Amino acid sequence: MSQSPRIAVVGAGLGGAATAALLLKEGFNVRVYEQAPSFSRLGAGIHVGPNVMKILRRIGIEDALNAQGSHPDFWYSRHWQTGDVLAQIPLGEHAVKTYGASYLTVHRGDFHDLLVKALPGDVVAFGKNLTHVEDRGDDVLMHFADGTTEVADIVIGADGVNSRIREELLGPEEPKYAGYLAHRAVFPTPQVKAGMLPFDACVKWWSDDRHMMVYYVTGKADELYYVTGVPADKWDLKDRWLPSNKDELRATFDGWHPTVQALIDATVDVTKWSLLERDPLPLWSRGRLVLLGDACHPMKPHMAQGAAMAIEDGAMLARCLKEVGVSNHSDAFALYEANRAARASKVQRISHDNTWLRTNEDPSWCFGYDVFNVPLVSPVKAAA
């Protein structure tokens, strides 16, 4: 092995970019391979909880993200028809004091842009669509669709629900359609009119079988985002997303509160996405290959913790590689899985059940988690 072991990260999404930034902070030799030719500000929002903000502090973008995002004082859950409060979870200053960092909502593209810009320009290679990977024992050979190859000492699969690295470890298998679709839209904040409630900075409207999560994506409160969870029996997995429209939304949320109707009326463009899952994997690594995020535990977005789990994975993996050393990658990967599998599986399960914060509960086990200071569990103990 070379004096400076080469770590390849496949995928420059939120999890991959964060992982690369954290590995670079630890002095590792890192290269990121991203299939997209470039990134754009796609129409989606994201929650960034204190558990993630503490990681962004290490990367060096906490202050910049705090300046961009919206800081809700509470997470509200409301009844779909009456608007009555079902739960009121304190965030704001309470989160800073109790969990050690802020809770914010922000445009996903703005967050991603900060993460990518935290990486040196020569670290990310765009237009690199991985087609095949060979673990040759002493190193890993990666083949890309443009006909090029690259060699690394270990390869981290941060390449999403249809991960090529996962396929190499476990064989081809389609993800499972979760039986739900999600509408997504970002649009200018409409005026509050008679019969409506003032817009909450962070609110989830619930009925028995569907919901709409709504929040600001800028600190100016001038841009709103919503994402729905709606049962749908069938979905062609060839379609990751499809266009939708206001008429479809009006039919889907017929009879819902006037505030929800106003959000639909204000919608400019809306898409609908399939929600995909996988059963917990029998392994997260083999040889010189290791998985993180949606590549090994894709989940419904119903806890708003999917990207958080990928970023936590990256932070723990960087911690374990620093602890054990890249030359002992097998031990590092085992330590990583022992310290991530239970937490990721718990979040995956609660996200599947869609019960998170529907009623008043204590979220400290999730928001208060500190990946850098949680005591490490040995792989032997984790398997016992």
Image (cartoon, rainbow, N blue to C red):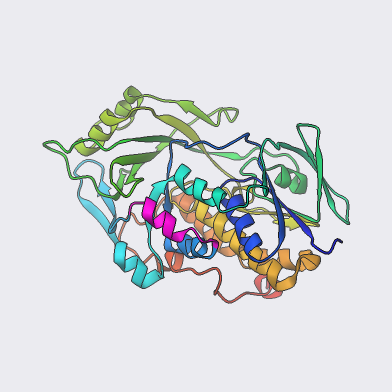
Query: Which image quadrant for residue 3?
Result: bottom right
Position in image of residue 378 (x %, y %): 68, 74
Instruction: Residue at 54% x, 74% y: name it.
Output: 373
Asked whether 51 or 8 is in front, the reply is 8
In the image, farthest residue toward the left: 194
Asked whether 68 or 9 is in front, the reply is 68
Instruction: Residue at 59% x, 63% y: name it.
Output: 315
Is residue 304 in view from this perspective? yes
Is residue 257 in view from this perspective? no
Q: Is residue 320 above or below residue 260?
A: below
Say whether residue 65 is magenta.
yes
Say whether residue 329 is magenta.
no
Instruction: Residue at 59% x, 51% y: name it.
Output: 17
Position in image of residue 257 (x %, y %): 21, 38
Indicate left or right for 8 with 184 as reference.
Answer: right
Q: Is residue 142 above or below residue 246?
A: below
Position in image of residue 79 (x %, y %): 25, 46
In the image, farthest residue toward the front: 121
Q: Is residue 124 above or below residue 378?
A: above
Which quadrant: the C terminus?
bottom right
Indicate left or right for 132 with 38 as reference.
Answer: right
Query: Which image quadrant for residue 133?
Result: top right
The region drawn magenta spans 59-70
Instruction: Residue at 65% x, 71% y: name it.
Output: 382
Which quadrant: the N terminus?
bottom right
* Prevalent SS, magenta region: helix
Position in image of residue 268 (x %, y %): 34, 27
Number of labels in the image equals 0
Indicate left or right for 253 with 147 as reference.
Answer: left
Indicate left or right for 237 with 360 as reference.
Answer: right
Asked whether 74 or 280 is in front, the reply is 74
